[in-house]
Amino acid sequence: MKNQSLNNAFPIVAAALGNKFGVKVKVGGSDAYTDGNTINLPAYNLEDPSYKDVAWGYLAHEAAHVRFTEFADFRKAATSPIRRSIVNIMEDIRIEKLMQNTYPGTKRTTEKVVEYLVQTGGFQIIGQNEQIHPADILSQFLLFRLRNDVLGQTALASYADTAESLLEDTFPVGAVTRLVALLSEAPEFQVTRDCVRLADRILRMIEEEQEIEQEKARQQQQSNQSQLQGSDDSSSQSQSGQSNNDQDDDLTNPSSGNSSQDNQSQGDDSQPDQDTDDSQSAQKPDDSEQADQSQGPSSQQNDADSDAQDQQPGQGHADSTGSGADDSQDQDSEHTLQALASVLSASEDDVPQDIFEAVQELLGSQSRNSYDADIYMPVAMDPNRNSSVGNDLMNKVLSDSGKIRASLQGLVQSSRCDRSVNKRSGNRIDGRKLSRLIQGDARVFERRSHKQAPNTAIHLLVDCSGSMNAIYSTDSNRRLIQLAIESAMALALALEGISGVNPAVTRFPFGDSDDVVPLLKHGQKVRPNASAFSAVTNGSTPLHSALWYAASSVIATREKRKVIMVLTDGQPDDECAAKAVIKRCESSGIELVGVGICFDTSHLFDQSICINNVSELRSELFRISRNLLAA
């Protein structure tokens, strides 16, 4: 066991943070998780500041989920991987911002987690991998940009800039512009449904951009086909005209065959108007080129710098360049369409891991010897209240507790006053000591010293295991648990009326678990909580977890003196674990008293008493308390 003190022990601080955030925290095992009601942290005991920073950040984040997330709406939003990813990112931003508004200190707590992940390479460095899925690019942009801009986590500024640059290279300008405009609403979100609505609007925007790009691609395809058809028609017409001109130049005498060929060429010129216009426009560069060819070798040599030597008539260099630009534009359009479609059809492997899922894995990935098996901080469960039972019990113990309270108060007050002491100086002369002056003794001034008030927090743990259901009196048919609960209430009533005493009562276990049920917390009054004092038994005797809870409770009190009193009738489930916690308590200045009902607890506690006559339980508890307060 590496840390014998409780003051800075991991589970004590975790429980204190849980109480501060208003959530239930359980410490134990080797896994970090939350079920929407309780947060579990591994029982880590090494002095590792970075680990603790990550653990506190995880606790603050999950506490924000427990406090602010509407889990029904959140679960319904997981209809597709990309929708779930976007909603999760938005929801994390929303709850952390609300947590910062409620507890400003959590801003730095979660920033430390981000800084740790940046330093250790916990974030994927986007842009280095050429095969990043578009859905991953979109999610990474949302994650980094919103955490940097909304939560002020400046450690992610460079990541946000890189992600934005990659986003602009992957998606059309219109989509990026609309996305940035939509994200401006994120800082004002109040409920989970707001995040779901924005995620749906983002996905709808991507669908609309996909339709726009599809329409552009269709129009571009039609334009390319039209240009290609026009180019083929003009090339055919140009070749036909070239052939006719060559034949006209070589003819010396017209023949019937040539006349027939001319008639055929004229027939080709009688096409519809659109083809005629295309043919005429295409023939202009052909005629110019034909004229260039007739200028001689020098002109052809100059033209060779810009035209291919094997260029066919009617196909200029400008047309070739235009075709290349069209091909590049088609490829860009196809890439954009594919990116938009990939986002909408993304699978689980295509979206990034949630940041705090990575933290969760980190907390549970420590070596086995890093965990302290002796640590198990239970959850404080709410008691089942019964007003009628509580009122009957209150009326039953009021008379007895009143008498004993008066006795305790008298004892405490008398113990606070010491006998008078005579001094050589003072404000009050003791007349009975004036004779000392004759002997030269000047100690005739009376001075009384007063002790401080008890200033004690007393936490009573009541064993409510199944064995406490045994009947101890055949005449009255009363059970041990009834007597124990009555005694606990009577003692709490008596102690709360004494200045400087802060009592609390907790029963254990809760059901078959290792959790506990606080009946009266430190600082509370008995009467408003009388309905919680019900004689219920179940489970075994997980004393070690109950001691952890009681220790964390008294450590958090302002009283200087701290006492835990354990009322039990049997052996604890794990004696070694119980002894380990007892040793920690003693090293932290907590006093422990064992009260065994027909059971000797001296092997567990240095201060212990065994009550063999069960009917004396109540009087013995008061006697122990009196001795503690008078000490």
Image (cartoon, rainbow, N blue to C red):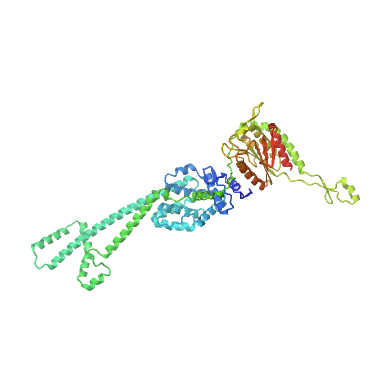
Q: Which residue is depicted at the point 82% across and 45% down?
A: 420
Q: Is residue 628 shown to the viewer in this render?
A: yes
Task: Give the quarter of the image for residue 264.
Answer: bottom left
The residue under the point 34% across, 55% down is 333
Q: Is residue 590 above or below residue 320?
A: above
In terms of depth relative to the viewer, which is nearer, 546 or 286?
546
In this rendered view, identify the residue nearer to me: 29 or 185.
Answer: 29
Residue 139 located left or right of residue 509: left
Whether residue 100 can be seen here: no
The quadrant of the image that shows the C terminus is top right
Q: Is residue 532 above or below residue 268?
A: above
Where residue 174 sits: x, y (%)?
Answer: 39, 55
Tell me: 580 left or right of 149.
Answer: right
Q: How many marks?
A: 0
Residue that protrudes farthest toward the top in the picture = 475
Q: Residue at x 22, y 57 (%)?
A: 274
Quadrant of residue 467 within the rendered picture: top right
The x and y percentages for residue 617 are 69, 34
Q: Residue at x 16, y 65 (%)?
A: 245
Query: Left or right of 157: which side holds 504?
Result: right
Residue 267 screen position, x and y as percent: 14, 58
Q: Is residue 357 above or below residue 534?
A: below
